[in-house]
């Protein structure tokens, strides 16, 4: 796991090495163990290394092919590199190191772009062909590893993070108001190529890029819809493949731990490590709060105390959030619509003391219908297929188990025309300036992508296409800020492609979600966790935090500030009234409050 960067000039002007070095220095947290630079003609490549596999100097990058024609900078892991090396050796390839980087480069030389379909892993890499003076870059199927870039008529600049690129711009960056609109109205980011900066884009997941003679071409190399495979025949097949995914992600020459929330997904990881891989020594890292406080999962985490040798926990508080706020905001570079990633930030900081690799449950909810609003999309599919009796049964089951009408309300929302869905969300956020809404609502595509799905399975694919990436970005930024590599076994493409082919009742049945995972984990995960129906993850008691004196003074000052008023985005008087109601306990608008805080501080840090 590393950081990569580079500049490709389209003219004959050579690159200043200092520009590459500055980018590397800005993201040194991504690779504290080693670094390297390649400079030639009109291209410069930079690399900072976090040593994971083959800790020797053989892992140094930029790395050359044996004939020195090709040079690569690579961030990520190819987990099946051992199997691929054996396959390449049969084709006549020879290897001088035990690194996955050499395997990746050899695979590209052997198979060209087709090599991407052979990789099981997470990656963003750039390969430069010194003979043809051309560049090839790629990002993994689901967007686990980041790739940001700035392009103009003179050059193409790329990096694993945004901040280093900002340092190369000739002018101050400007805010992308459509990204801000989606963030405030839909709580969504990263559903397309735009970022919060007009000057910066990202290479989308499952895409590759080529540059030759000053021409940049981007294309999609992986389409999940076109790559779905036959569904699992039973839960045992699912378990076997999930266990194999974990085995691949245990390949490491440094200590490995698990981010453990106490929910079904992370508990499945821990339990399979215990019972299928005999790893009672694995370190786990959790965020806990006082008993009964929102976000506290202690009673579920404690189920593993008799089974695990190395359990660690940390307690985020209003005071720690206030103290960490600017570091957290700088680490993430773009606004985040909630404080849950802050809990993960603290967990990664804790993990940094003990391990260099963590395993996490990201992606399980998106493929197993883990969010409660997926019930509404499931019901929409049943209605469209006129399965009225099944729909009625499932509506009753959801209400009985979850004690809420949320699924029914979600169904109604998903049946609305797109324009009404957007307007409804805008009206919920009554604090937004009318002119801001008017200018940006028509350019937002969120309602048409994530919420337009006609069935549950279509919705799951849409979530992989348009929603999952922001969670992966937050995890990458949280983990790499503390020099940790985060691995996500639920996103093994073999698992995803078969899970998303399952019939809906293998995902949702009788008011219960994640059916196949629950069946697979019977007698593996503790019953108390297996049968829980709530959804928390790394939650936080943010509503309580924003009523504390330290935040009360800060938030009121922020809302009343001149800079907050002149943005033309949020009505200060409306925000003030919302906050007063929150303080009195009349309503809970903690997520909105955090969005105001993060957005305003982001403006001050990155734009002003």
Image (spheres, helix red, strand yellow):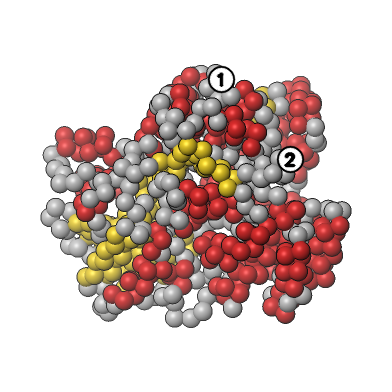
Q: Are marks 1 and 2 in contact (CB under 8 Å)?
A: no
Q: Residue at x 51, y 19 (%)?
A: 234
Picture quarter with the C terminus? bottom right
Q: Residues within 10 Å of mark 1 (few under 14, many from 20)?
A: few
Q: Secondary structure at mark 2?
A: loop
- Which of 483/76 is in front? 483
Q: On the rendered structure, is 480 left or right of 393? A: left
Query: Where does label 2 land, which residue?
Result: 292
Q: Residue at x 68, y 31 (%)?
A: 533
Q: On the rendered structure, is 5 left or right of 130? A: right
Is residue 384 something that shows in the picture? no
How far apart are labels 1 and 2 at the CA level? 28 Å
Counting from the top left corner in percent of width and height, residue 167 is at: 44, 75
Q: Quadrant of residue 306?
A: top right
- Which of 481/150 is in front? 481
Counting from the top left corner in percent of width and height, residue 417 is at: 74, 48
Q: Earlier in the sequence, mark 1 or mark 2?
A: 2
Q: Is residue 606 above or below residue 60?
A: below
- Which of 576/367 is in front? 576
Query: Where does label 1 land, which residue?
Result: 522
- Which of 346/122 is in front? 346
Q: Is residue 16 above or below residue 81?
A: below
């Amino acid at each position: 796991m590393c950081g990569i960067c580079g500049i490709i000039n389209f003219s004959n002007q050579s690159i200043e090495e200092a520009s590459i070095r500055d980018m590397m220095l800005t993201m040194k947290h991504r690779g504290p163990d080693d670094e390297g630079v390649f400079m030639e003609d009109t291209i410069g490549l930079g690399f900072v290394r976090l040593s994971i596999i083959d800790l020797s100097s053989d892992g140094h990058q930029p790395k050359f092919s044996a004939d020195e024609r090709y040079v690569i900078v690579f961030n990520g892991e190819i987990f099946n590199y051992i199997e691929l090396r054996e396959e390449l050796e049969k084709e006549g390839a020879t290897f001088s190191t035990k690194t996955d980087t050499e395997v990746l480069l050899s695979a590209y030389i052997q198979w060209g772009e087709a090599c991407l379909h052979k990789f099981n892993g997470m990656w963003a890499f750039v390969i430069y062909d010194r003979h043809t003076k051309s560049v090839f870059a790629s990002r993994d199927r689901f967007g686990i590893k980041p790739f940001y870039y700035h392009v103009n008529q003179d050059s193409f600049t790329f990096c694993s993070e945004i901040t280093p690129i900002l340092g190369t711009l000739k002018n101050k960056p400007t805010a992308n108001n459509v990204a801000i609109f989606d963030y405030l109205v839909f709580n969504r980011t990263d559903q397309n190529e735009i970022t919060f900066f007009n000057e910066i884009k990202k290479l989308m997941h499952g895409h590759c890029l080529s540059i030759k003679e000053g021409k940049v071409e981007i294309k999609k190399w992986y389409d999940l819809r076109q790559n779905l495979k036959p569904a699992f025949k039973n839960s045992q097949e699912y378990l076997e493949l999930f266990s194999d995914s974990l085995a691949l992600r245990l390949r490491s020459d440094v200590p490995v731990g698990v981010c453990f929330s106490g929910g079904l997904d992370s508990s499945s990881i821990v339990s399979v490590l215990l019972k299928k891989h005999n790893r009672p020594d694995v370190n786990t890292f959790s965020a806990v709060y006082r008993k009964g406080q929102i976000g506290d999962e202690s009673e579920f985490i404690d189920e593993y105390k008799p089974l695990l040798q190395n359990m660690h926990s940390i307690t985020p508080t209003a005071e720690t959030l206030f103290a960490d706020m600017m570091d957290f905001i700088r680490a993430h570079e773009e606004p985040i619509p909630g404080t849950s990633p802050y809990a993960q930030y603290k967990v990664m900081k804790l993990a940094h003391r003990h391990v260099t690799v963590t395993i996490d449950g990201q992606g399980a909810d998106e493929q197993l219908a883990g969010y409660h609003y997926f019930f509404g999309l499931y019901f929409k599919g049943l209605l469209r297929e006129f399965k009225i009796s099944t729909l009625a049964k499932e509506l009753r089951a959801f209400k009985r188990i979850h004690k809420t009408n949320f699924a029914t309300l979600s169904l109604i929302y998903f049946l609305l025309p797109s324009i009404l869905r957007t307007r409804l969300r805008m009206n919920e956020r009554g604090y937004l300036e009318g002119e801001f809404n008017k200018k940006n609502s028509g350019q937002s595509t969120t309602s048409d992508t994530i919420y337009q799905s006609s069935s549950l399975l279509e919705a799951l694919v849409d979530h992989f296409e348009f929603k999952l990436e922001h969670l992966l970005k937050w995890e990458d930024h949280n983990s790499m800020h503390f020099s940790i590599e985060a691995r996500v076994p639920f996103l093994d493409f073999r698992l995803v492609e078969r899970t998303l082919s399952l019939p809906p009742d293998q995902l949702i049945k009788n008011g219960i979600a994640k059916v196949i995972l629950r069946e697979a984990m019977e007698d593996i995960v503790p019953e108390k966790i297996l049968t829980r129906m709530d959804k928390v993850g790394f939650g936080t008691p943010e509503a309580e935090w924003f009523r504390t004196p330290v935040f009360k003074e800060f938030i009121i000052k922020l809302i009343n500030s001149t800079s907050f008023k002149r943005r033309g985005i949020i009505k200060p008087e409306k925000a003030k009234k919302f906050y007063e109601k929150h303080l009195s306990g009349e309503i809970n608008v903690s997520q909105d409050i955090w969005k105001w805080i993060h957005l305003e501080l982001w403006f001050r840090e990155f734009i002003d």
